[in-house]
Image: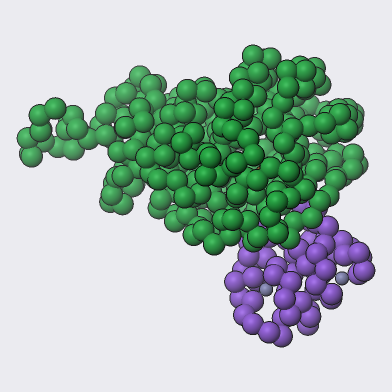
Chain colours: A green, B purple
Amino acid sequence: MTAAPQTAAADTDPRDVLSIAREQVLERGEGLSEEQVLRVLQLPEDRLEELLALAHEVRMRWCGPEVEVEGIVSLKTGGCPEDCHFCSQSGQFPSPVRSAWLDIPGLVRAAKQTAATGATEFCIVAAVRGPDKRLLSQVRSGIEAIRAEPETSDINIACSLGMLTQDQVDELADMGVHRYNHNLETAKSHFPEVVTTHSWEERWDTLRMVRDAGMEVCCGGIIGMGETLAQRAEFAVQLAALEPDEVPLNFLIPNPGTPYENYPVVEGVEALRTVAAFRLALPRTILRFAGGRELTFGDLGAKQGMLGGINAIIVGNYLTNLGRPAVQDLEMLDELSMPIKALNQTL
Amino acid sequence: MDEFCGWCGKSTGEGEHGACASRLGLVDPPRFCSACARRMVVQVTPAGWSARCSRHGESTSEQATD
Ligand code: SF4
Ligand SMILES: [Zn+2]
Ligand SMILES: [Zn+2]
């Protein structure tokens, strides 16, 4: 490629990645390539505002102003046999998190707490390699109990129960689970550094079966696990290839006892750049702020993220970590004049 | 005054617990009993948490914010 004249304005410079993104992503709805995402991740801080504004335009154009609000709860906490190095629930590390099971009345209460925020999504999560019979029957009873309560009878129920067999996929689809979460967590090239007890490909297989069974696919990961910028770009396009309905973006919470306990928290500017870059790689997906934003951004950055490509949030607490109170996020959305996606829009 | 730090489980009379306190206020429920430092069984839910020590019983987010 020949160099453009020095005098060319940034928005007409064919080499400028944001000009390319404006035409390719905003106008045509085509996500950025790996090489282009990397260039976005390498943009200097003085281009951040411009980047976030473009990511916001892309989100408004291809997803609209609605924000999808979700609550999550841990049905089975801790004691997981896998060794995901970021995870406080792995039984392989000296984490202070102890095993716990939530009973059905507790699960229903959690669903009601979620519905009370106006959320349309409630995700039931278990710390397991994959579900066994006991867990699946608990999930089935839980879903029936949630459906039996007027406040939660029509909330969308998602599950995150690890890797699945085809029979288990079919069973969950039969229970009316509308979306299944299973994170690839990080780039394929970085995954073996993060997890040694199963492979990226095994996770991918579960996601493919979920899609084929007609459930929505929710698949994201965690930023800040020692991956390079190039690996972040790799991850973004690997997710794009999956065409997930939702991508939850987490920022590492260095949890005590885990191999990553002393990793630095992702810096706010870097996190915002990552959010925007993922939006430019995934123009149509539901891009959700998930765990870690409280440590990474504080209150201010959450708003910037909402104006930088994010169109979904987890409100309230997470699985083993706390979030900020749901009311703070709902007030923020109100202030930003971003309507909460209603149930009939998701049907 | 709590005898043990809910975040790291060490004696509050020894060492520095400022970082522990800021994690507790922001992203973590207590994991250690403040009376005996046992690891507690903690359940986080969308709107709160509860923590149970086998010796000292249950505490919840509601009590903690009272
Ligand atoms: S499989 Fe899930 S719960 Fe288990 S260690 Fe990995 S991330 Fe944690
Ligand atoms: Zn401490
Ligand atoms: Zn105790």
Q: Quadrant of residue A131?
A: top right
Q: Quadrant of residue A143?
A: top right
Q: Where's residue A262, x and y in %?
A: 54, 62
Q: Is residue A134 shown above or below B31?
A: above
Q: Where's residue A195, x and y in %?
A: 59, 42
Q: Is residue B17 shown above or below A253?
A: below
Considering the image in quadrants, where does the N terminus of chain B appear?
bottom right
For this rendering, which residue is in front, A243 or A165? A165
For this rendering, which residue is in front, A297 or A345? A297
For this rendering, which residue is in front, A236 or A133? A133
Point 81% across, 51% down: residue: A99
Point 32% across, 23% down: residue: A24
Give the quarter the ligand 2 occupies: bottom right
Q: Is residue A154 shown above or below A9?
A: above
Point 66% across, 20% down: residue: A210
Question: Is residue A68 found left or right of A46 in the rendered image?
Answer: right
Considering the image in quadrants, where does the C terminus of chain B appear?
bottom right
Q: Is residue A157 shown above or below A265?
A: above
Q: Where's residue A267, x and y in %?
A: 44, 56
Q: Would residue A222 be seen by someone viewing this image from the given angle?
A: no
Point 75% across, 64% down: residue: B30
